[in-house]
Amino acid sequence: MTGTEKSDHGQWSSRFAFILAATGSAVGLGNIWKFPYITGENGGGAFVIVYLLCVLLIGIPIMMAETMLGRRTRQNPIDTMITLSDEAGADKNWHYLGWMGVIAGFLILSYYSVIAGWASAYVLKAFTGSFFAADASEIKGLFDGLIASPIQLIFWHSLFMLATMSVVARGVKTGIEKAVRFLMPSLFVMLILLVAYAMTTGSYDQGLKFLFTPDFSKLTGDSVLTAMGHAFFTLSIGMGAIMVYGSYLPKDVSISKTVFLIAGTDTVVALLAGMAIFPIVFASGLEPAAGPGLIFQTLPIAFGNMTGGWLFGILFFVMLVFAALSSSISLIEPAVAWLVENKGMNRKQACIWSGSITWLLGFGTIFSFNIWSGFKIFDRTIFQLLDYLTANLLLPIGGFCIAVFAGWIMKRQHSEHELGMPNTLSYQVWKVLICYVAPAAVFLVFLHVVGVL
């Protein structure tokens, strides 16, 4: 296998297009919704330093490996692992790694779309002035009213899924690539505008101090594992998305340089989100460690009670929707690619099938917030169970297996060839990280999330 084969779905028109698409996959609700609140919960600057180290030592090596596996075969994740295990003379059961990625993406999108629907609903709420002069109890009432209404949640979930599938159905160049060429620059412009606005709040220095001044006394072992886990998950590793995007990557593009740019851009977005959010939080006398409610139940109070809050509230939630959409199209692409390559479907048919199943699965998450809230499996609602299975089990196992396969199973000459780093110091560093550091770190994350550590 030379790696010169072309995917049935075409390929990115340029390295820049792949960077935008893969960055779009990585940049999502995790950067703008989760990163600020977990930073707030874990002491600020010291947590950020640990997070950056984890991106460098764990996230980037595994992302390079996953991209490399996809580009070598030009196939969907399942067929990629079948082909590569045959090439390496390895156990055929490695194809289950591909299945794990496809299933994880499927399950994640089923509830991700519901949460993205919340952000979509909040665009309308911000536009109609629902946050204006509202206090904490009124904002809480808005949020509680939204998640208590199955009809509202079904509407927003359906709208978001329709937007996702309409992009994916158009293919690599005219669908995904065209969408991310609009979504990602727009996301950056809105983030920069929000940071500029944060500078006018009078608490910008306080926000920067919180975000970048390390206080290691507040850093715990749990904080380190949280940073490690978030660095791993925010790069979309282990769910097949990067593998299938890698399969559309032209042969003459450097994987290592490209992945560094993607990881760097993803990290910049997360930091910009913190630079925009924390000054607003401090200026409004709110709590930076407010947890998951920071976005939906805390920031609306700030937007409703500050000068210009109407406009910047709209911008913020539009940005959140854009980030969610750029990720959602990558979550369903591995399943669509598999259906096209193995079941004789065209992309539109594959999108209808995969989108419909994902849409129906989303009803479990919707109802877990209201009419099925008392129904629990292993003491978890359907939403909590799906989140636990994917984030805490499927993705860590997937990332661990990618590192093991790329580092220990794949032939050295093949990985050197695909990475374009034959007998170089860079390759040796990557080899050490992918063989030893990354698997050990991901294994620690896995032990942590299952409650062993």
Image (cartoon, helix red, strand yellow):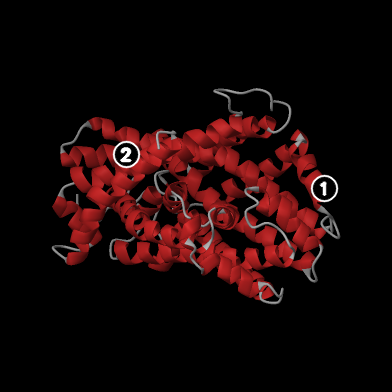
Task: Compute the Cα span from label 1 to label 2.
Answer: 52 Å
Count of marks placed on residues: 2
Residue 166 location, x and y as percent?
A: 59, 49
Please give the label number shown on residue 79. Answer: 2
Residue neighbourhood size for the residue with mark 2, other residues' Cα within 10 Å, grouped as few (<14), some (14–19), many (≥20): some
Residue 181 sits above or below residue 347 on the image: below
Residue 405 location, x and y as percent?
A: 25, 43
Residue type, mark 1 in image:
Ser
Q: Nearer the viewer, residue 14 or 202?
A: 202
Residue 253 visible at all: no
Q: Which residue is mark 1?
A: 137
Q: Nearer the viewer, mark 1 or mark 2?
A: 1
Instruction: Pick whichever of labels 1 and 2 is earlier in the sequence.
Output: 2
Q: Nearer the viewer, residue 48 or 12?
A: 48
Residue type, mark 2 in image:
Asp
At a point 57% along the width and 70% down the height, the residue shown is: 209
Q: Quadrant of the C terminus?
A: top left
Residue 385 sits above or below residue 114 on the image: above
Residue 116 sits above or below residue 424 on the image: above
In the shown orientation, is residue 441 left or right of residue 84? right
At a point 76% along the width and 45% down the height, the residue shown is: 143
Residue 106 location, x and y as percent?
A: 50, 38
Q: Nearer the viewer, residue 182 or 346?
A: 182
Residue 297 visible at all: yes
Residue 22 location, x and y as percent?
A: 44, 57
